[in-house]
């Protein structure tokens, strides 16, 4: 591939578009814009032809792995295929050409989409009301913790800590601390579930709540969730559901049935917004009835087929984000939910579960599986057997890139030594799962016969093995 930048391809006179000659009077720009705001020289934009621009960007898009290119089993991240019809609607001028400061009467349909998504998410989770403002999962967690604080403040409860299992996503303890609480870790059992005895020793009147990921980051359904909820509720604590990975549950069980008080969803994982490049995302928070007064403002309300933005909630925690959050993500969610319907959601969850279990069953004879319970949407192996041949989990991940698929999440969750956390998602068919399984088996054979293929991988990618410490310390994004 020719790696020239567009500015390096530029030559005077090359052009992409022929504009017609101007047939209206020409005025000097200085007549409209004060001179001190004007550029003194040329703008320096490259002069290139249209095919050069197209080839440049198409080639760039093939340098990185992405979900439209091939399998992307990045555990906990739910890198599933995102239907293109979502983009069609999110990019429609009726959506993109409205302004968030427009008057309510002129954006009734936009408010309706917002209101509908709130209703749909309530139907899916059993919560009473959602806020769609938070811009990501972690932002939603912070919002949920702030709602918890407000609840305890109103009740004059003196709470200081939030309990979190040791398998939790790193954002959980970070959000707890940002929200002004102390995070206390609860151990897992040998099965990978919350250790109830350990939980009891840490339970006291100072506990504000419990943050639980279900299915947890081992992919296992927390079957004692009702007992955990009763314990937490016995000290007037609140149950917080990290529902970033709801594609194992939706259509099958509601979070309210598991006695959660607060539910967070990741629209950019579960509800099919592309992610991985840093956004935009959305991490809505749903709550049970007693917490509704504390949700952020403004809220979209509906009266006689008329939608309004209301700020009239004196007990609200305030505004989490300007302009009601990342609206285009909410539009994609609306389309996704309408396309699937209730039966479709059940199918999604069942396929996510079948796919993860198919991978588990097809690889557990050669890759160590430390936690044996039936997984839901992802399964977590360890690279320990391959390590005996001098090959690390990182080397397995790098070798996968040579075969043209993305690596799984590695070294997380922390309670699995050398973790390989594989989430196939529901959008892959049997052929692509079999292809991945064949590759994983080939890599296992290589780890015994030719370990250097792994330790020197990747060789087939545009950039070979990186010195990741140097890359982080001396960031250089030019090539
Ligand atoms: C992705 C994820 C989060 C955080 O979501 P972001 O949108 O990345 O902030 C939290 N918990 C779990 C279990 C996740 O998988």
Image: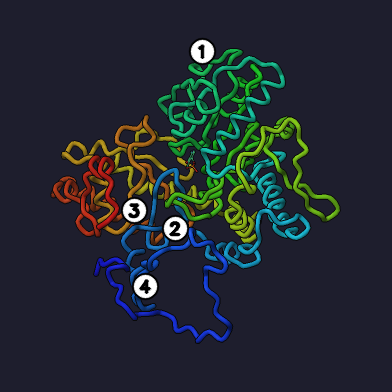
Determine the secondary structure under disc 4.
helix
Label 3 lies in ligand 1 vicinity (Cβ under 8 Å): no
Q: Earlier in the sequence, mark 3 or mark 2?
A: 3
Position in image of residue 52 (x %, y %): 34, 75
Give the residue displayed 66% in from the left and 61% down from the top: 98
Left or right: where 77 falls relative to 134: left
Q: Residue 406 has which mark? A: 3
Position in image of residue 223 (x %, y %): 54, 31
Q: For the residues marked 4 and 3, what is the alpha-carbon distance in whole angstroms?
A: 27 Å
Q: For the residues marked 3 and 2, what is the alpha-carbon distance in whole angstroms?
A: 14 Å
Relative to 16, residue 68 above or below: above
Q: Residue 201 has which mark? A: 1
Determine the secondary structure under disc 1.
helix
The reply to whether residue 140 is visible in this rendering is yes
Viewer-proximal residue, 8 or 71? 8
Circle nearer the viewer, 1 or 4: 4
Q: Quadrant of the C terminus?
A: bottom left
Position in image of residue 55 (x %, y %): 34, 73
Give the residue displayed 73% in from the left and 59% down from the top: 107
User: Which residue, given by chain and number where applicable, does mark 2 sit on?
Assistant: 428
Quarter-wise, where is residue 387 in the image?
top left
Relative to 101, residue 283 above or below: above
Q: For the residues marked 1 and 2, what is the alpha-carbon distance in whole angstroms?
A: 43 Å
Q: Earlier in the sequence, mark 1 or mark 2?
A: 1
Q: For the residues marked 1 and 4, what is the alpha-carbon distance in whole angstroms?
A: 63 Å
Q: Residue 53 has which mark? A: 4
Quarter-wise, where is residue 310 in the image?
top right
Circle nearer the viewer, 4 or 3: 4
Label 4 Cα neighbours within 10 Å, binned few <14 / some 14-19 / many ≥20: some
Circle nearer the viewer, 1 or 3: 3
Give the residue displayed 50% in from the left and 16% down from the top: 197
């Amino acid at each position: 591939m020719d790696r020239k930048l567009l500015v390096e391809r530029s030559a005077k006179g090359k052009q992409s578009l022929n504009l017609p000659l101007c047939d209206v009077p020409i005025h000097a720009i200085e007549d409209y814009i004060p001179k001190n705001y004007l550029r003194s020289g040329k703008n320096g934009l490259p002069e290139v032809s249209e095919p050069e621009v197209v080839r440049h960007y198409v080639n760039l898009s093939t340098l990185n792995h992405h979900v439209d290119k091939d399998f992307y089993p990045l555990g906990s991240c739910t890198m599933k295929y995102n239907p293109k019809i979502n983009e069609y609607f999110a990019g429609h001028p009726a959506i993109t050409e409205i302004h968030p400061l427009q008057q309510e009467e002129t954006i009734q349909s936009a408010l309706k989409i917002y209101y509908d998504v709130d209703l749909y998410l309530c139907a899916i989770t059993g919560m009473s009301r959602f806020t769609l403002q938070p811009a990501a999962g972690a932002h939603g967690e912070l919002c949920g913790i702030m709602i918890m604080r407000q609840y305890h403040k109103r009740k004059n409860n003196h709470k200081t800590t939030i309990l979190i299992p040791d398998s939790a996503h790193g954002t959980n303890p970070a959000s707890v601390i940002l929200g002004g609480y102390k995070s206390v870790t609860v151990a897992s059992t040998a099965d990978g579930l919350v250790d109830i005895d350990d939980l009891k020793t840490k339970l006291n009147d100072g506990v504000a709540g419990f943050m639980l990921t279900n299915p947890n980051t081992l992919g296992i359904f927390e079957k004692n969730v009702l007992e955990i909820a009763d314990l937490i509720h016995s000290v007037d604590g609140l149950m917080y559901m990290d529902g970033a990975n709801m594609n194992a549950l939706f259509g099958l069980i509601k979070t309210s049935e598991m006695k959660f008080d607060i539910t967070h969803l990741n629209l950019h994982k579960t509800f099919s917004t592309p992610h991985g490049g840093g956004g935009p995302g959305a991490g809505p928070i749903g709550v049970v009835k007693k917490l509704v007064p504390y949700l952020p403002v403004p809220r979209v309300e509906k009266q006689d087929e008329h939608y309004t933005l209301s700020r009239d909630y004196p007990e609200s925690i305030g505004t989490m984000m300007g302009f009601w959050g990342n609206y285009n993500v909410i539009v994609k969610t609306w389309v996704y939910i309408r396309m699937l319907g209730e039966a479709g959601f059940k199918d999604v969850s069942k396929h996510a579960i079948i796919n993860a279990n198919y991978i588990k069953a097809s690889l557990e004879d050669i890759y160590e599986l430390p936690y044996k319970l039936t997984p839901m949407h992802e399964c977590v192996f360890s690279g320990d057997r391959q390590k005996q041949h001098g090959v690390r989990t990182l080397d397995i991940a790098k070798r996968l890139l040579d075969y043209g698929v993305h690596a799984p999440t590695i070294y997380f969750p922390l309670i699995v030594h050398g973790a390989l956390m594989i989430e196939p998602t529901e959008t892959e068919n049997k052929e692509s799962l079999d292809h991945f399984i064949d590759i994983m088996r080939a890599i296992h054979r290589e780890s015994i016969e030719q370990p250097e293929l792994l330790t020197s991988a990747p060789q087939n990618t545009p950039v070979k093995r990186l010195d990741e410490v140097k890359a982080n310390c001396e960031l250089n994004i030019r090539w």
